Amino acid sequence: MVKKTGRPGYLQIADDLRAQIRGGSLGPGTPLPSTAQLAEQYDASLSVVKMAVGILRNEGLVIGQQGKGVFVRDFDDAPAAGDLAGEVAELRSAVQDLSARLTKVEEQLATSTTRRSGRSSR
């Protein structure tokens, strides 16, 4: 059941399901209860349950199969932590590169704007 702790219900549900997955009570390949069953179990709305399951999907703990349900992901199929770290490093590098390029463009734009405003005042 979702408690009135100030923490959003969907996060509480995600935390509980995550703990069950990591604790082994929901093992790899095990289907999660249906959205309606989870909503009843946690006394929450369908949208709150869907948000909780969405979090677990984003974390790679569960995977949805169209028309069949949502299943606990087999961790052998999940990307290795090293692979994820490499991807994060690549993304970080790309963001730093884009930030540097944006800074240059903004400086050029500021210089260009200063020159134009100087000409119009003559």
Image (spheres, rainbow, N blue to C red):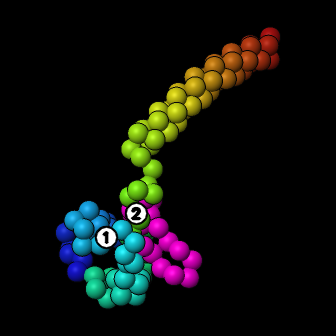
Viewport quadrant of the C terminus: top right
Snapshot quadrant of residue 45? bottom left
Q: Is residue 114 visible?
A: no
Task: Name the residue at 52% across, 29% down.
Answer: 93
State the image coordinates of residue 92 (x, y, percent, origin top left): 49, 33
Q: Which residues are magenta?
A: 55-71
State the image coordinates of residue 88 (x, y, percent, origin top left): 46, 38
Q: Please name whichever residue, 56 or 8, is drawn nearer the observer in this view of the structure.
A: 56
The amino acid type, in three-letter code, at marker 2 is Asp
State the image coordinates of residue 73 (x, y, percent, origin top left): 41, 65
Viewport quadrant of the N terminus: bottom left
Whole-number angstrom distance, CA of label 2 to CA of label 1? 8 Å
Snapshot quadrant of residue 29? bottom left
Identify the disc placed on residue 27: 1
Element at label 2 = loop
Task: Name the residue at 29% across, 67% down.
Answer: 21
- In the rendered structure, the answer to whether residue 77 lies left or right of residue 119 reads left
| Residue found at the far front of this picture | 76
Q: Which residue is mark 2?
A: 74
Q: Is residue 63 visible?
A: yes
The disc, 2 or 1, on the residue closer to the chain's N-terminal end is: 1
